[in-house]
Image: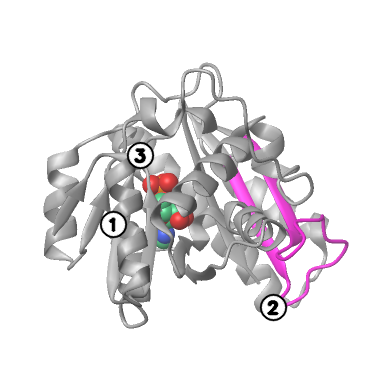
């Protein structure tokens, strides 16, 4: 496994690989890897000659007062996990190289990234789209694997890839969960035992919604949202950021829930820790 830290070297390497007809599969991450990240590596393994994973905590996708400084980092552990999972190349760029001091060019998606996390975290998707465009240009992937855990991010990046004509195919992996159902996230590291317990309500609220729709046959958006909120309000440390039911392709609010089309997306704060989860009906 090779670790590349310089932008110039990354460019040379990816151009060389593509010139030799190699297929590059890319998993962009912010590190502090867990099984959710690694499952994305597995997902594209069979389609790719080279598995490339990047580790970069991207400052521009964090808002003022968010957790950029304390975001968990452990590069040695990440590299060990990558090695054990058969990753070929790890790109760990320096911020000073990704963003020139006077960098003034950003990528802004103006439709699917506006609601939900786009609304709760202004400029978040601008940061995500910008850094991904840069990483795609440097890594030249044929395939990019993204997690359904960040459902809106998937839709934003698919839109950007289409609109900017990146010759990249997106592969989406399912949400990986802890045995008790909590969606895996690097941010789970922040959770103290009591907070961890309440974080589980997010998954339980989603299960409650699933039950109302699947067992009771309800397609009523307000009823299902009420069910979700009802479970979430049991958490004393928990504040709801948003609960939305949207069309999974357009991210527009649904009037009625339809199987195969509607997405329930939940974002909460457990004390200072922000968690998201979702479910496709
Ligand atoms: P992050 O390091 O949080 O930026 O995530 C990097 C990639 O891993 C994104 O495409 C995420 O959607 C994906 N990811 C994060 N958590 C999970 C999970 N629990 N299951 C599946 N994919 C995940």
Q: Is residue 207 left or right of residue 178?
A: right
Q: Is residue 132 above or below residue 167?
A: above
Q: CA distance from mark 2 to mark 3?
A: 33 Å
Give the residue at mark 3.
Answer: 56
Q: Is residue 219 above or below residue 67?
A: below
Residue 94's label in the rendered image is none
Residue 82 lies within the magenta run: no
- Secondary structure of residue under mark 3: loop
Give the residue at mark 1.
Answer: 13
Q: Residue at x 63, y 37 (%)?
A: 126
Assign the N terminus to one quadrant of the image: bottom left
- How many C-alpha atoms fall within 10 Å of the one at disc 3: few (<14), some, or many (≥20)? some
Q: Given this view, does label 2 or label 3 mark the residue nearer the observer?
A: 3
First in sequence: mark 3 vs mark 1: 1
Give the residue at mark 2.
Answer: 260
Q: Given this view, does label 1 or label 2 mark the residue nearer the observer?
A: 1
């Amino acid at each position: 496994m090779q670790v590349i830290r310089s932008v110039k070297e990354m460019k040379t390497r990816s151009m060389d690989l593509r010139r030799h007809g190699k297929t590059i599969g890319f998993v962009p991450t912010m590190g502090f890897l867990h099984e959710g990240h690694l499952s994305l590596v597995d997902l594209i393994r069979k389609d790719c000659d080279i598995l490339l994973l990047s580790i970069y905590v991207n400052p521009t996708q964090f808002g003022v007062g968010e957790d950029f400084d304390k975001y968990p980092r452990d590069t040695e552990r990440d590299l060990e996990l990558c090695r054990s999972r058969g990753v070929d190349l790890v790109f760990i760029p320096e911020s000073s190289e990704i963003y020139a001091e006077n960098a003034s060019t950003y990528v802004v998606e103006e439709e699917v990234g506006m609601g939900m996390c786009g609304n709760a975290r202004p400029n978040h998707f601008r940061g995500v789209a910008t850094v991904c465009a840069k990483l795609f240009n440097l890594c030249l992937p044929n395939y990019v694997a993204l997690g359904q855990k960040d459902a809106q991010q998937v839709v934003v990046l698919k839109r950007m890839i289409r609109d900017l004509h990146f010759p990249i195919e997106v592969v989406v992996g399912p949400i990986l969960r802890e045995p008790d159902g909590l969606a895996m996230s690097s941010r789970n590291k922040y959770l103290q035992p009591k907070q961890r317990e309440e974080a589980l309500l997010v998954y339980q609220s989603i299960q409650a919604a699933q039950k109302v729709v699947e067992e009771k046959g309800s397609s009523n958006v307000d009823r299902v949202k009420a069910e979700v909120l009802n479970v979430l309000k049991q958490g004393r440390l928990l504040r709801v950021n948003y609960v939305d039911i949207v069309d999974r392709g357009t991210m527009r609010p649904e009037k009625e829930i339809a199987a195969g089309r509607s997405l329930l997306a939940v974002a909460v704060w457990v004390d200072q820790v922000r968690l998201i989860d979702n479910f496709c009906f």
